[in-house]
Image (tube, rainbow, N blue to C red):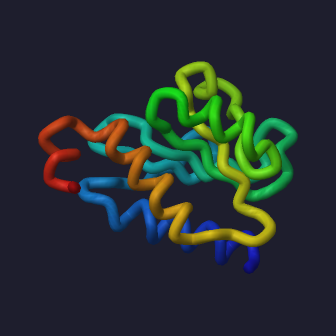
C-alpha cells in the first residue's frame, strides 16, 4: 500500500470515531476530540522516515509493546514521556489491530461521557 493509501486508511479509522476532527499540527494531519490531541500521522518526523502514527495509549501499554515488539512500536518524541505509543505503519499491517489501537487511544482521551457512549 502506498503512503497515501495508508494515510487515507488511518484517516477513515480516526474520522469514524465520535466527534473526532482533523487539522494540521506541525505540518502533519492530526486528530482531535474537541480540543484534546488524540493522534498524529507523523510520516517523516524526527528521522523516522517510515509511515507511522503517534497515539495515546493506556498506562503501561507503551512500555510493554516497545519492549516486546520494537520493530513495530516505539516511544515517540515529545509525547512518549506521557505514555503515548509510536506505531510503525510499514510492512505487513494488521488493520484490525490498528483499529483497536486507535479505539484505545480514543478511550484514553475522550471525555468520560463521550467515551462511555463509544463502548
Where, by quadrant of the figure, is residue 35 drawn?
Answer: top left
Q: Nearer the viewer, residue 102 or 69?
A: 69
> What residue lies at 51% left-to-right and 70% top-to-bottom?
96
**Is residue 2 left or right of 6 when viewed as pictured?**
right
- Image height of 93 relative to 110, above or below: below
Quadrant where the C terminus is found in the figure: bottom left
Q: Nearer the viewer, residue 31 or 83?
A: 83
Can you give x and y, in whole percent of width and height, for residue 4 in the image?
68, 73
**Is residue 22 left or right of 2 when viewed as pictured?**
left
- Image height of 86 relative to 81, above or below: below
Can you give x and y, in whole percent of width and height, for residue 111 in the image?
22, 36
For the view shown, which residue lies furthest in the top direction?
81
- Image height of 84 relative to 91, above or below: above
**Is residue 35 left or right of 62 when viewed as pictured?**
left
Where, by quadrant of the figure, is residue 20 drawn?
Answer: bottom left
Quadrant where the N terminus is found in the figure: bottom right
- Image height of 83 relative to 2, above or below: above
- Count of marks overlaid on the render: 0
Can you give x and y, in whole percent of width and height, for residue 52 in the image?
69, 53
Can you give x and y, in whole percent of width and height, for residue 16 in the image?
34, 67
**Is residue 77 left or right of 81 when viewed as pictured?**
right
> What residue lies at 56% left-to-right and 53% top-to-bottom?
29
> What residue lies at 79% left-to-right and 43% top-to-bottom?
70
Amino acid at each position: 500500500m502506498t503512503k497515501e493509501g495508508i494515510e487515507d486508511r488511518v484517516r477513515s479509522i480516526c474520522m469514524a470515531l465520535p466527534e473526532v476532527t482533523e487539522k494540521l499540527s506541525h505540518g502533519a494531519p492530526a486528530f482531535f476530540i474537541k480540543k484534546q490531541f488524540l493522534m498524529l500521522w507523523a510520516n517523516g518526523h524526527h528521522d523516522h522516515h517510515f509511515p507511522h502514527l503517534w497515539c495515546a495509549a493506556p498506562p503501561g501499554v507503551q512500555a510493554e509493546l516497545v519492549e516486546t515488539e520494537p520493530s513495530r512500536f516505539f516511544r515517540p518524541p515529545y509525547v512518549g514521556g506521557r505514555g503515548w505509543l509510536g506505531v510503525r505503519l510499514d510492512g505487513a499491517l494488521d488493520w484490525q489491530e490498528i483499529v483497536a489501537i486507535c479505539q484505545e487511544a480514543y478511550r484514553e482521551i475522550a471525555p468520560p461521557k463521550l467515551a462511555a457512549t463509544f463502548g
